[in-house]
Amino acid sequence: MLDSRNANSKFHDELTLHDGDQTEVGAANDTVSTIKGIYPGSSVTAYEGTAYTPHNLTWCYVHVHYKKTKELEQDCAIFADAPVLCFVDRSTSSRVPKRLSQGKRVEHDTGSGLVFFQGEAADVQRYLNNHYPNPIHLVKDPATGMPAVIPNDQMIPFMQASRLGSSLVRIMDHPISYYAEGHKLMRILTGILKGREGYVVRKAGDRKFILPFGNKSLSISNIHKELFEEVVEQG
């Protein structure tokens, strides 16, 4: 169990880039084989008294100003009705210009403002309504009009890769079905993603392993050292 009241706990932030809308995380020099497991020892906030084995709960998320993410993160360690887990990935950031007093402009890092909560969407939204007078709403799935939901087993590889810190993983706006046409369903046999199924797609001169991520998908780079097998439907 993690005690999120530990002031020395480390947390992460995340960022949406625009290549058809995508979020980039991970390290360009790493492969999926180099990523250590997320459970235990991750940088996920769990409030005190919560068993750190909520593997069956789904995740939902909000999109706020990047400066708001720290408050949301800290509040999850304070309020008794906070979601089970809170994940703010700070492994990537955009670089935006900032004007100094001398008139010079420098670049500084920001985060995307995406904050993930584990728990039932209705409970998470109720928590947000109870504690933030300026409304914060869960991001909705355009296909259903309901809060977007990410299964825990899809969230885990994202959190694992987010710890590396550069360009290993991207969140893509397209659902996994978008990549199914013209590609075979493959199962990865090596690395921390061993056993997961998705599509191997060539993009920007590199092979990517595409995995489902709620109503979006994850694109994982640097898979050239990994082994795959085709998933054959039984029947």
Image: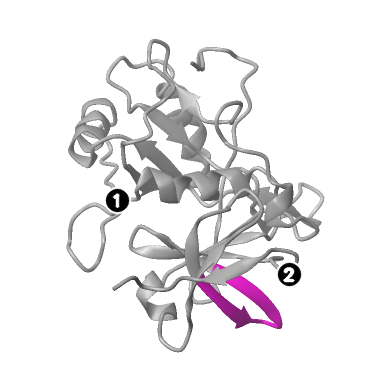
Identify the residue at the far front of this view: 235
Residue 123 vs 144, above or below: the answer is above
**Amino acid on which the number 1 mark rests in the picture:** Val
Q: Of helix, strand and loop, which one carries label 1?
A: loop
Does any portion of residue 114 appear in the rendered image? no
Colour theme: one colour
Q: Which residue is drawn at 69% across and 66% down?
A: 223
Image location of residue 133, percent across then percent down:
25, 32
218 relative position to 10: left or right = left
Question: Residue 158's mark?
Answer: none
51 relative position to 1: left or right = left
**Amino acid on which the number 2 mark rests in the picture:** His
Tell me if residue 16 is in the magenta stretch. Answer: no
Tell me if residue 203 is in the magenta stretch. Answer: yes
Contact check, label 1 and label 2, Cβ < 8 Å: no
Image location of residue 122, percent across then percent down:
18, 38
Image location of residue 201, percent across then percent down:
57, 79
Q: Distance between the residues labelled 1 and 2?
A: 31 Å
Residue 99 vs 56, above or below: the answer is below
Label 2 CA crowd tier, 10 Å (few <14, some 14–19, many 20+): few
Query: Range of the magenta residues?
Result: 199-209
Label 1 CA crowd tier, 10 Å (few <14, some 14–19, many 20+): many
Q: Residue at x 51, y 39 (%)?
A: 88
Residue under numbered circle 2: 224
